Amino acid sequence: MTTQSEYILEESLVDQLKELGYEKVAIRDEKDLIQNLKTQLEKHNKTQLTEYEFSQVLNALAKGNIFQKAKILRDKVEYIKEDGETGYLELINQIHWCKNEYQVTHQISMEGKYKNRYDVTLLVNGLPLAQIELKRRGLELKEAFNQTNRYERHSFQAGKGLFQYIQIFVISNGVNTKYYANNSIKARSFKQTFFWADIDNAIVTQLSEFAKVFLEPCHLSKMITKYIVLNESHKILMVLRPYQYYATEAIVERVKNSNKFGYIWHTTGSGKTLTSFKTSQILTQLPDVAKVVFVVDRKDLDYQTIKEFNSFSENSIDGTNNTNSLVKQFSDDTKLIVTTIQKLNTAIRKERYLKRMERFREEKIVFIFDECHRSQFGETHQRIRDFFESAQMFGFTGTPIFADNAVKNELGKRTTKELFGDCLHKYVITDAIRDQNVLKFSIEYIRTFREKDHIVDIEVDGIDKAEVMEAPERLEKVVNYIITHYNRKSHNKAYTSIFCVPNVDTLIRYYEIFKRKKEEGQHDLMVATIFSYQANEEDADANGFIPDEGFGEDSESTLLKAADPKVEYKSKHSREKLDEFIDDYNQAFNSNYSTNDFYGYYKDIGKRVRNKQVDILLVVNMFLTGFDSKKLNTIYVDKNLRYHGLIQAFSRTNRILDEKKSQGNVVCFRNLKKNTDDAITLFSNKDAIEEIILAPYESYIDEFAKAVEKLLIIVPTVDSVNHLQTEDDILEFVKAFRELMRIKNVLTTFTEFDYSDLPIDEQTLEDYQSKYLDIRDRVQDDKEKVSVLNDIDFEVELIHRDEINVQYILQLLIQIKDKKPQDQEDQMRTISNILATETQLRSKKELIERFIEESLPEIQDTDDIPEAFEAFWTEEKTKALQSLSNEENLNAAKLNTVISNYLFTKKEPLREELIEVMNTRPKLKERKKASNRVLDRIKKFVETFIEGMG
């Protein structure tokens, strides 16, 4: 049977969309698109537009980038009528989302930088709001994703830029179908493409089934009008995933039709904050709801969270301790309130606020509790329930409290179901891993002590736990292990880590060991710490809770601890130590924090962990719950954890980021194997362990061997890559080698990884890698050619090693001078191989080789090599900059400024900035092409002469 062609797939889809209610319309190019837009807008708005009026509308629609156009779509377009009156056009009906005009067309041609023809376009009121790109069965789905990126670069912005109104992309090869929000190419990632699913999380992959449920006109426009979020901070569109959609719908329906409570169980890392915030926004539009109060715990209200909430709804959150501002929000016309549980508790307890709050007792107020597993099980929750008599309460949690993991408090043992009622939607960790919304865990259990000739397990052998676990020799071994393997776990500091320990005393000792070893030159890791300076004993029962470490004026736990006279001496010592450690932090980052501004320090350290400025964050409990950082990939654990506390802590590591981050690393210095299995069983099912934890090292060695076998069938030798005949043959090699590198990427994070375990030697692997990169470079250079290789993702991050840079090459050159002739040849081969295989050095290869051939033989003293290279490099850089200026007729001084700003901000210069650099401003039609060419040359210059120098 022949493979179904892309054309047949497209025709079948268009026929299905017609049956779903779309009108098929023939649109060949932008001229047809604009004429159709005029007709559809007139129909939707029940009006007639003159050419003069429509030209104003068209000019208004042409303004702005993707994000700005998303705002225009949701607003009304203002124009001046022929009679001088002001007119307004609605672009899409957001209240009654089914009442819009739906059309489908295919094979629209648009010409920008290059000419492109798009597969299937869905028009709503004449605007292209959804674009479907298809690949024939058997091809990678990612090729369709890359093709939409190519369209964005080449033609979506052409003409009036109407294709930048696309809100949702759909990509499919017939058997797999995904959707994602439109954004600039920089903000797009294949990791942010999603399968649709049914309410029970069964994914919908077949194109026909996906079209039936997702592309149905009412559902598509509901997703566009209700379930796309405009993130103001990052200026991006975010579309909800299916489980987020079902959770929001379930709460909205419950509020509309009953007064019952409920909770949402969505696993840690699945985007609960976005779901709960979107739910809150929709609830504010219900006429019966007086207020919606979104409640978080104060410890979660760090810098990033405030920024995130405000990005969904500008100025929606007040990060201060001022309860008066909360009471004022209750009293004015603010419909959506974001606050902390501490401030809410103060507002209904303190006499000075009660009079103003009294009138809200009988109002229908909906409370949404974020991360309700932590702060909703004590007196505060009961107090809120008792005060707001007509309230509805909904909780979001990744780790619910069941009978098995409930802890006794002042109100007895209570479960999430007892507090909030029914679970309205469930999306557990196995669902999230299957959907690639979070990563699996790689868990290693490291034994840190022996007794005589056998390994001791203190859980079994019944010895003095504290004496052994906190012995100086053991702590020293743990630190040595972390230092030795840090680069391996972090992919040479591409990611960062957390290290959690049982109590403050142990933390202090660990910090001081790290500090001493750094002063001795044993490592260059940036270790920072934060902890509560009240008493902070180890949780003897390891009951699963990670206790709150209170701070701030509203924290009851702080007040209770401070009132305990037994705490004073220890607290004083802890606080002095913390101030000492904060001084180290201040010196490193030129800041000025202390325990007097504990909350400020807390926010800043979280920000620096996210920015990879801290390599190891040493904590007792803080940051083990509610802290999200995609750039964190490892947690070192020397602390007893169980149930939800264990899952929460481990889940700091498994946020999706890029291809290189293949798993979350968990390194346990205690035997937590049974606790881990119990926690996974409780929060998913007893068969889930293999789905959540990576297979053993040996399994990946076997997988690698199979991948090598497949590669060698395609290309038996390195030279045979040169003789691949067709693009399809080259594509098969690229896919096979890429899969090999993906497995190797996982393997290299294992402590026991050794090249001798692989069925192919390192040199041969790097030779194949060089051929792989040659193909990539050839494809990138031939931008005008349209081929299957244009859309393949080479995933070069898998073969990028941060420690290999120009300085590394110089050190190898210095070593050459003192070697024997044969050893010199071997060293030169090594250097040549590195230049060919390291992605960040390939652009420098020709220049470095010229330095080696022409300049190196003239240098007698090896100490002079760095200085000679610097002089050579500076001269070549100056020549290259002068050539760029001359060939493009640019102002040299202005060019220097643009490049300096680019290096400082890491943001590409805007088109107008590039035009300003040109001595002769190009004609209007030529500006885009000219500025793109100059930008490409600037980026090439920076890549060659500045990046990767070391």
Image (tube, grey):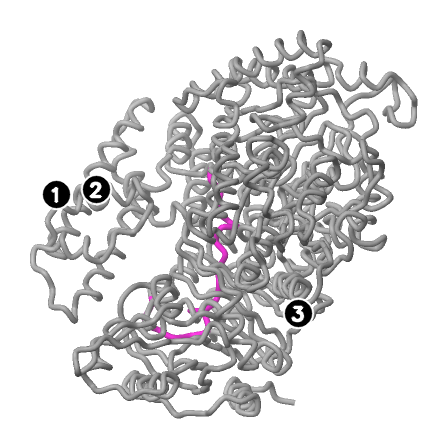
Name the secondary structure under disc 3.
strand
Place of residue 69 in the rendered image (x, y in percent of width and height, measured from the top left): 35, 66
Place of residue 476 in the rendered image (x, y in percent of width and height, measured from the top left): 68, 17
Report the disc number at residue 197.
3
- Does the CB distance between marks 2 and 3 fall below 8 Å? no
For the question of whether residue 724 can be seen, the reply is no
Q: Nearer the viewer, residue 674 or 401?
A: 401
Q: Is residue 209 above or below residue 548?
A: below
- The residue shown at (74%, 20%) is 537
For the question of whether residue 778 can be seen, the reply is yes
Q: Amino acid at mark 1?
A: Ala
Place of residue 252 in the rendered image (x, y in percent of width and height, measured from the top left): 63, 64
Q: Nearer the viewer, residue 830 or 678?
A: 678
Disc on the earlier residue, 2 or 3: 3
- The residue shown at (17%, 83%) is 82
Report the disc number at residue 876.
2
Name the secondary structure under disc 1.
helix
Q: CA distance from mark 1 to mark 2?
A: 18 Å
Q: Which residue is mark 1?
A: 893
Disc on the earlier residue, 3 or 1: 3
Q: Nearer the viewer, mark 2 or mark 3?
A: 3
